[in-house]
Image (spheres, rainbow, N blue to C red):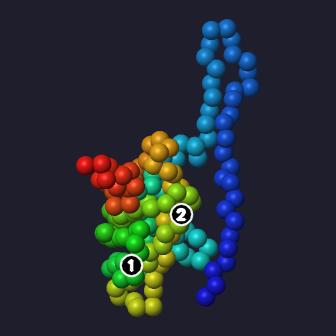
Amino acid sequence: MAAAKKSCGKMGGGVHFTEEPPSAGAPSHVHFDEKLHDSVVMVTLQDDGNFMVKVGFLKTQHRYEIVFTLPEVPALGKDVCPAPIPNPHLKITDVKPAPEGGLKVTCEYLAQQEGVLCEEVLLLSETNDDVCVRVKVHARVMDRHHGTPMLLEGVRCIGMDLEYDSEQSDWQGFD
């Protein structure tokens, strides 16, 4: 089955300045659109019934726990499990009904390389073999030498993956 490519348009948003000139001694006011204040993981239902989860900026060679809530998918039912298809970078560690409805999903993500990355996992219904939902986790991963990203709510760093750390292997030769 061929997947159709879609372009991602920029979301509307911006900065608004008050139109009246400030009076002497009065502070000027800048108003930001609410979209600029989004500091949580964004879950979007795609046209095909699957989900895109945007987790913001991450850092290479770091491991993250990502928690998000999917809206209710009636066809999946209440008993849901991750597909047994291994993904070396993204692993669902827990799926349970969310108190506010839908599914609370916890996963572990290893950011291996820099760039705009999209990893995919499947959620399966335990009561209907014909139903599955594809969840794509979209991250912008920056090199570990370029600062520390401000993580979105629902994302936390749980460690570094030093297995691929070339600087650590350089130290080993100088004993």
Q: Nearer the viewer, residue 37 or 166?
A: 166
Residue 71 visible, this orientation: yes
Q: Nearer the viewer, residue 45 or 82?
A: 82
Q: What residue is pinned by disc 2?
A: 117
Where on the picture, by quarter, is residue 19? top right
The residue furthest top is 24
Q: What residue is pinned by disc 1?
A: 86
- The numbered mark, 2 or 1, whose residue comes first in the sequence reads 1
Name above or below for residue 69 compared with residue 142: below
What residue is shown at x 62% (from left), y 24% (from top)?
29
Amino acid found under the numbered disc labelled 1: Pro
x, y percent for residue 118: 53, 66
Amino acid found under the numbered disc labelled 2: Leu
x, y percent for residue 99: 33, 62
Name above or below for residue 36 compared with residue 107: above
x, y percent for residue 28: 64, 20
Name above or below for residue 49 compared with residue 109: below
Label 2: element kind: strand
Left or right placement of residue 144 versus residue 98 in this view: right
Q: Quadrant of the N terminus?
A: bottom right
Where on the picture, by quarter, is residue 68? bottom left
Label 1: element kind: loop
What residue is shown at x 36% (from left), y 82% (from top)?
84
